[in-house]
Image (cartoon, helix red, strand yellow):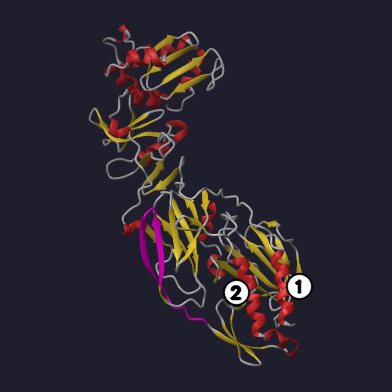
Amino acid sequence: MRRGAVALILALALSALPLPVAAEVPEVPFGTACGYGADFPINGGQFFTQTGSNTGGGYPVVDDDAAKFWTAFQELGGYQIVGYPVSHRFVLHGFLVQAFQKMVLQWDPSKDGVNVANTMDIMNREGHDEWLATFRQVPRHATLPEDAGVPFSQIMENHLALLDVNPAIRDAFFAVPSWLTRLGLPIAYGDFGSMVAMRTQRAVLQQWLVDVPWARAGQVVFANSGDLAKEAGLFPAEAIAPVDPHVPPADADLVTIGSEMPRQGDAISIRVHTAAGGVTVSWNGRPAPLVCRDGAWHALLGTASTAMAGPHELQVSVGERMVDISVELAERPFPSAEFHIPDSHEDLLDDEVAQEEREFLHSIVLRVSGGPLWTESFQRPSSGRITSPYGERRTLQPGSFMSVHEGVDYAAPTGAPIPAPNRGRVAFVGPLTIRGNTVILDHGFGVFTLFYHLHDFSVLLGQVVERGATVGLVGSTGRSTGPHVHWEMYVAGAAVDPIGWVDGSLYMLGEAESYVPARIGDEPVAG
């Protein structure tokens, strides 16, 4: 085929490519903090920003040598029962405590566990009863005369009898698992007109007699006793001040590279250990898009089998701060093979045609349409044996035409279905001169899978296909010596070894919270 005709076909194919569309991982503006308004794992526990007063800051809940508040938080039922943290750890009346919306947890070294603090009793001793009654409709603490000089079993019976005044509150009280541990004993009952309330040692149960935004008439709800104590000023100011999780660590701890010794042909995951906005990552001067996951920014880089072994430049910026990191790319041995092309296919050894087709493919795989579309691990597109590995150095005869095999070939019969390795959008479907009938899937985040030499197609341009859906049938079109599945994978514009994606951990980047396009300084990079 003449070069001009090839160029016309490729130009028409390129013009048919769909425009980038929004990915399911939401795109956020450059400068947005990672994980704002959410919680994310940290060493030994979790960091919560939900109660950070819209500052983006919050409070860590962790296990360490001093206390195991993270374990206790989970065992007590998590945020649904305990509420989100509203303080850091601090010492209250000689005990190490941490306040949450619904209760205050007090560390007890003697049992290597927590007690639920008597928050409402403490507020009484600290002189907050008048404020509670006037501004928060909480009954004042009441001492029962019949408690004097009797054993605890009788005291317990006296206080539980207070619940008889309101059957709905009584039922709600006893419906709480381990009610004595979580609520303590009933202390006082009060009628505030539109609402009645039972004060216990550790909580307040309210029954609203009219509809309010947070409760229906007659419904019993629990007031957030931890929030009440915080609002009343029971906790020191330094204990309730949110901390900023976005402050980056020192240069030496800022970046983690997914592989300690990446090799030629690897996809390399990069984790930037900060939730700060304004993060950029570039690899050998090429900017990379980012996703937010677990309170940190992540990038995905690609290295071809032909990439130079030795040092490569990774540059990470956080605002005005710039960190240069030299990443050593290890040399990887690749096999070699010689192929004899039939006389009928000798025209497919034209180097100009090969170059033109390669440029067309790169015009597709260099684009980034949005965030990841996948959430599962990648699967191989054939159960057949590998007949030609990734990176194989080939000599094509006649003419000793040199070529690098940028994918993996699997033995498969003509007409066998080819399943999609993962969820993606069809970025190209059609015939190419050398690669034959071709399907390209865009998985988002600069990740593409490509299938060549197909006998027939099963998808349409722009179609979203799910993991395992048939994209086409095995064939031997184009420059091929027999039917097989040719699977190729591009990451950040580089043809990587797809085997490294099968059942690996890179798929976890698809579970991202948000996505930021690649940028150089303040300028976005066109996808």
Viewer-side residue, 472 vs 113: 472
Secondary structure, magenta segment, majority class: strand
Query: Which residue is pictured at 42% across the width and 75% down the height?
Result: 330
Q: Residue furthest bottom?
A: 399
Three-letter code for the amino acid on which mark 1 is drawn: His
Provide residue 497's location: percent of width, then percent of height: 54, 71
Residue at the top extreme? 145
Q: Residues within 10 Å of mark 2 (few under 14, many from 20)?
A: many
Query: In the picture provided, is 104 more to the left or to the right than 307?
Result: left
Per the image, the residue denoted by label 2 is 407
> Magenta part of the protein: which range?
312-334
Position of residue 227 relative to residue 265, above or below, is above
Q: Is residue 496 above or below residue 247?
A: below
Say which label, 2 or 1, has the lower sequence index.
2
Tell me: residue 186, above or below residue 381: above
Q: Can residue 91 be seen?
A: yes
| Rendered image quadrant of residue 97 | top left
Inspect the magenta stretch and tell me whether residue 185 lies in it: no
Query: Which residue lies under the disc numbered 1?
Result: 455
